[in-house]
Image (cartoon, rainbow, N blue to C red):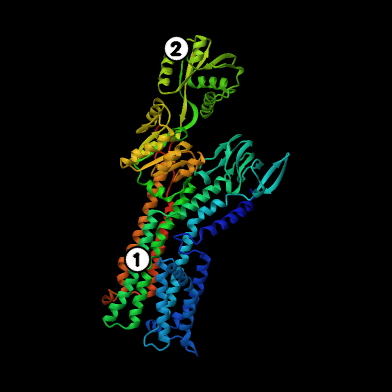
C-alpha cells in the first residue's frame, strides 16, 4: 500500500487529538497550552544565556579560582542576562502560578514562581544598593534546570500519548470505490454507507463494513490485540484500520470516519485518560498539602536562620532552595502519566477503559460473573458430543451429517455444518436433498440415502435405535441438549448432541481466574440443566439459572451485600442493568451498544480470556501508581531538611541549583518508572492455551 496515504490521515487525526488533549479543562494537565518544543526552545536559549551569567559570577570565580575577562560593562553581565532568563525562561512558570492562584489550587507552578521571584527581587535589591550578594547565577541556573526538567516531563507525556496517536495513523485517507464495474480513487470522507470499496492485498481497510466478495486473512492485532491473522470471507465484518492479507476484498461500507470502531476506541482512550480516579484525587490533595508544607517550611527556614544571626543572602538562598526542592512536580505527574500509559497499553491489547475507576477496582475482584450466551458460549449451535455405532467413526458420521445438512438453513443444521468446518472435516455435496416437513431432512451421500432429524423423525419412521445411542440421547436431553439422529436404512447409526457451543477460550479464562483465587459465577436465563452442564464442563463455582433480565442486577447486589467485589461480564441489552450495578462492568465489544455504554471496560474481541488480563493490568497500574507516589512524596522527607540547612554543621549545604536538580531528578525518576509499564506483557500467559487441558 502507498505509505503516504496512511501517514497523511495519521497526521490529520493526530493534530486533532493533540488539540483536544491539551484543553483548559483537563484537571491534571499542569501544562495546558504548552508543548515539548516550547520547553525545548526556552531551555536552550536560557542555557546559552546562563553560561555567561555563571562565568562572570564573582562567587563562581572565587570558588573555582579564575578571573573572567574585564571590559566596560562586564560587571553587569550577570544582572542583565539573569534578568532576561527570569522574564524569558521564567515567564511560563509565572503564568502557570497565576492560573493556579486564580483557580485556588496553588501547587508546582506557584512554588517555582515564588522561588525565582524571591531570588530575582532580592538580586535587584542588591544591585540597587542593599548590602548582600546577588543571586543571579543561582536564579539563572534554577530557571534553566527547571525548564530542562519540564522538557523531559513533556516528552514523557507525549510518548505516553503516542500509542493513541499511532492508532490514528492506521486509517488511510483514500479508498478505491467500486461503481458500475469501474474503480475510482476517492478520499475516505467522500464515502457513504452502502458504497462498495475495493481493498487490495496489503492495504489497510479504510472503513468498517461487510465483505460482499472475496476471501483473505486480516491482521487485527492493532485493534483487538490478537496477533494471529483472522480469516475473513463473504458476510464477515471488517474493521477500519486493520491490514488486509493476500486476498482482494469487496467491502460494503457500514461506518466511515468518526463512526468507525477505531475512532470509537480513540475516544474511549482519550476520555479515560482525562477522567478522575481515586488515586488521582489522592495525589492532587497530597500535592496541595505539600505546597502548604513547603511555604510553611520556607517561612520557618527564614525565621530560624535570621534568629541565629545568619547573613540575609544566606537565608534567602535557603528559602529559595526549600521552595524549589519541595515542588510537588513529581507528585502531580505520578498518577496521570501511569494512567496515560496504562489506558493506551490496554487499548493496544483490545481492553478499552471507559471509566478508570473500573480499572482501578479490578485488582480487588473476588467474583467474576459471566453471562452465558455469547460470552462463555458462542451464542450459536455446535455439536458438543457424538455417539456413533456400526463401526462408524465420529468424524465419518459428522462428514455425512454435514453433507446432508449443508443446504438447510435451520440453525441446528448450520451448527452441524460449522462444527465439521471447524474440525477441518471435508464433506461432499449431497444429492436429492429434501426436507421432511417438521421432522428433519434427507439426502444421498456417496450413493447412500440418509435421514437426519430429532425424536419426531424417530416416531414417524419407527426407527430402530441401538441401546448405546438411546442412552447417550437421554443423557443429552437431561443436560438440555438437542439430540439429532443420523439414520440409514431405518436404523439410527449415530447421534449428535447439539447445544450452544462453549468457547474454547472459556476454559483458559476460568482456569486463569481460579489461579488468581477469584471465584467464577455464571448468570443466565437458560434452564437449570443447561446452565449446570456448562458450569460443570468449565469448572464454574456458582450458577444462577432461569434468571429474568430484570432480576440480573439483584443477583449482583446479593453478592455485593456479602462483602464481595463483583465484576459482571455481558454483551446483551438485558445485561446492561447488571453491568451498571457491578463494581466493575465489563462489556463485550461485539455486543450491543447499550451493553457497551453500561460497562466500565469494553473488550474489543469476544474473548473471556481478556478478563484475567484486565486484572493483571489493574494490579500493575496500581503498583506503578503507589511506587511513584511514595517516591514523589517520600524524597521530601530527606530533601526538605537538607534544603533548609539542618546539616550545615556537617558541611552539607544544598544550593538552589542542586535543589532544582534533585527536584527534576525526582520527576524524571517518576516518568521513567511509569514508562516501565510499557514492558508489561498482557498476553494471556495464565492458561493461555485454549481448550480443556491445562
Q: Is residue 692 above or below residue 489?
A: below
- Quadrant of residue 150 in the image? bottom left
Label 1: few (<14), some or many (≥20) within 10 Å?
Answer: many
Q: Which residue is mark 2?
A: 466
Query: In terms of secondary structure, where does tag 1 sit?
Result: helix
Between 437 and 170, the one nearer to me in the picture: 437
Q: Quadrant of the C terminus?
A: top left
> Considering depth in this image, is 40 or 228 the residue closer to the camera?
40
> Which residue does the numbered mark 1 point to in the structure image?
290
Residue 694 appears in the picture as rendered: no
Residue 675, given in percent of the width and then of the height, sits at 43, 56
Q: Is residue 449 visible?
A: yes
Residue at the far front: name it.
550
Q: Position of residue 219 (x, y in %)?
A: 55, 42
179 with respect to 519 (left or right): right
Query: Does 612 appear above or below 621?
Result: above
Q: Is residue 525 above or below residue 664?
A: above
The quarter of the displayed image where residue 626 is located = bottom left
Q: SS class of the residue under badge 2?
A: loop
Q: Position of residue 30 (x, y in %)?
A: 45, 64
Q: Residue at x 40, y 74 (%)?
A: 114
Residue at 41% x, 85% y is 125
Q: Compared with residue 206, is residue 233 higher up or lower down, i.e. above or below?
A: above
Q: Which mark is residue 134?
A: none
Question: Mark 1 or mark 2: which is in front?
Answer: 1
| Residue 373 or residue 598, whichever sits in front | 598
Query: Could you tell which of marks 1 and 2 lies nearer the N-terminus?
Result: 1
Amino acid at each position: 500500500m502507498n505509505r503516504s496515504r496512511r501517514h497523511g490521515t495519521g497526521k490529520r487525526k493526530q493534530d486533532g487529538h493533540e488539540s483536544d488533549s491539551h484543553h483548559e479543562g483537563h484537571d491534571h494537565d499542569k501544562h495546558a497550552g504548552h508543548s515539548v518544543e516550547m520547553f525545548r526552545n526556552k531551555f536552550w536559549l536560557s542555557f546559552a544565556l546562563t553560561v555567561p551569567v555563571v562565568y562572570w559570577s564573582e562567587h563562581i570565580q572565587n570558588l573555582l579560582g579564575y578571573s573572567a575577562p574585564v571590559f566596560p560593562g562586564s560587571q553587569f553581565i550577570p544582572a542583565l542576562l539573569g534578568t532576561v532568563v527570569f522574564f524569558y525562561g521564567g515567564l511560563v512558570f509565572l503564568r502557570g502560578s497565576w492560573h493556579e492562584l486564580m483557580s485556588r489550587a496553588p501547587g508546582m507552578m506557584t512554588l517555582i514562581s515564588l522561588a525565582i521571584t524571591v531570588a530575582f527581587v532580592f538580586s535587584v535589591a542588591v544591585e540597587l544598593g542593599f548590602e548582600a550578594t546577588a543571586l543571579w547565577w543561582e536564579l539563572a541556573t534554577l530557571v534553566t534546570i527547571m525548564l530542562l526538567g519540564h522538557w523531559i516531563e513533556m516528552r514523557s507525556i507525549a510518548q505516553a500519548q503516542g500509542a493513541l496517536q499511532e492508532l490514528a495513523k492506521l486509517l488511510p485517507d483514500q479508498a478505491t470505490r467500486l461503481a458500475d464495474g469501474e474503480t475510482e480513487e476517492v478520499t475516505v470522507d467522500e464515502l457513504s454507507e452502502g458504497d462498495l470499496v475495493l481493498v487490495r492485498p496489503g492495504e489497510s481497510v479504510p472503513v468498517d463494513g461487510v465483505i460482499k466478495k472475496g476471501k483473505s486473512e486480516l491482521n487485527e492485532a492493532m485493534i483487538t490485540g490478537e496477533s494471529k491473522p483472522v480469516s475473513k470471507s463473504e458476510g464477515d465484518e471488517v474493521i477500519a484500520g486493520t491490514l488486509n492479507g493476500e486476498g482482494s476484498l469487496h467491502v460494503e461500507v457500514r461506518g466511515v470516519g468518526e463512526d468507525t470502531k477505531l475512532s470509537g476506541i480513540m475516544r474511549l482512550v482519550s476520555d479515560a485518560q482525562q477522567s478522575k480516579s481515586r488515586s488521582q484525587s489522592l495525589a492532587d490533595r497530597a500535592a496541595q498539602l505539600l505546597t502548604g508544607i513547603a511555604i510553611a517550611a520556607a517561612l520557618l527556614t527564614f525565621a530560624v536562620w535570621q534568629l541565629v544571626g545568619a547573613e540575609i543572602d544566606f537565608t534567602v538562598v535557603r528559602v529559595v532552595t526549600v521552595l524549589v526542592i519541595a515542588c510537588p512536580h513529581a507528585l502531580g505527574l505520578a498518577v496521570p502519566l501511569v494512567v496515560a500509559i496504562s489506558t493506551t497499553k490496554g487499548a493496544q491489547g483490545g481492553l478499552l477503559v471507559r471509566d478508570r475507576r473500573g480499572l482501578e477496582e479490578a485488582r480487588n475482584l473476588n467474583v467474576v460473573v459471566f453471562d452465558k450466551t455469547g460470552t462463555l458460549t458462542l451464542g450459536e449451535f455446535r455439536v458438543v458430543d457424538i455417539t456413533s455405532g456400526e463401526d462408524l467413526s465420529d468424524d465419518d458420521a459428522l462428514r455425512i451429517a454435514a453433507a446432508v445438512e449443508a443446504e438447510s438453513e435451520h440453525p441446528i443444521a448450520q451448527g452441524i455444518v460449522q462444527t465439521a468446518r471447524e474440525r477441518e472435516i471435508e464433506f461432499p455435496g449431497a444429492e436429492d436433498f429434501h426436507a421432511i416437513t417438521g421432522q428433519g431432512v434427507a439426502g444421498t451421500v456417496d450413493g447412500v440415502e440418509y435421514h437426519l432429524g430429532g425424536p419426531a423423525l424417530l416416531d414417524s419412521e419407527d426407527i430402530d435405535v441401538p441401546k448405546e445411542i438411546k442412552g447417550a440421547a437421554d443423557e443429552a436431553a437431561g443436560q438440555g441438549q438437542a439430540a439429532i439422529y443420523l439414520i440409514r436404512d431405518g436404523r439410527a447409526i449415530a447421534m449428535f448432541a447439539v447445544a450452544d457451543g462453549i468457547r474454547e477460550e472459556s476454559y483458559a479464562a476460568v482456569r486463569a481466574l481460579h489461579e488468581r483465587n477469584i471465584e467464577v459465577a455464571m448468570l443466565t436465563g437458560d434452564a437449570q440443566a443447561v446452565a449446570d452442564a456448562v458450569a460443570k464442563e468449565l469448572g464454574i463455582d456458582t450458577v444462577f439459572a432461569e434468571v429474568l433480565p430484570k432480576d440480573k442486577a439483584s443477583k449482583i447486589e446479593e453478592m455485593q451485600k456479602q462483602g464481595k467485589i463483583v465484576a459482571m461480564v455481558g454483551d446483551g441489552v438485558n445485561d446492561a442493568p447488571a453491568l451498571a450495578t457491578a463494581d466493575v462492568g465489563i462489556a463485550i465489544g461485539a455486543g450491543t451498544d447499550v451493553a457497551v455504554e453500561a460497562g466500565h471496560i469494553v473488550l474489543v474481541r469476544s474473548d473471556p480470556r481478556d478478563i484475567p488480563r484486565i486484572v493483571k493490568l489493574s494490579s500493575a497500574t496500581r503498583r506503578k501508581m503507589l511506587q511513584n507516589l511514595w517516591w514523589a512524596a517520600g524524597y521530601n522527607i530527606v530533601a526538605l531538611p537538607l534544603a533548609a540547612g539542618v546539616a550545615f554543621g556537617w558541611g552539607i549545604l544544598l544550593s538552589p541549583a542542586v535543589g532544582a536538580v534533585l527536584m527534576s531528578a525526582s520527576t524524571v525518576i517518576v516518568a521513567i518508572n511509569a514508562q516501565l509499564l510499557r514492558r508489561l506483557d498482557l498476553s494471556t500467559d495464565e492458561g493461555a492455551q485454549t481448550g480443556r487441558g491445562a
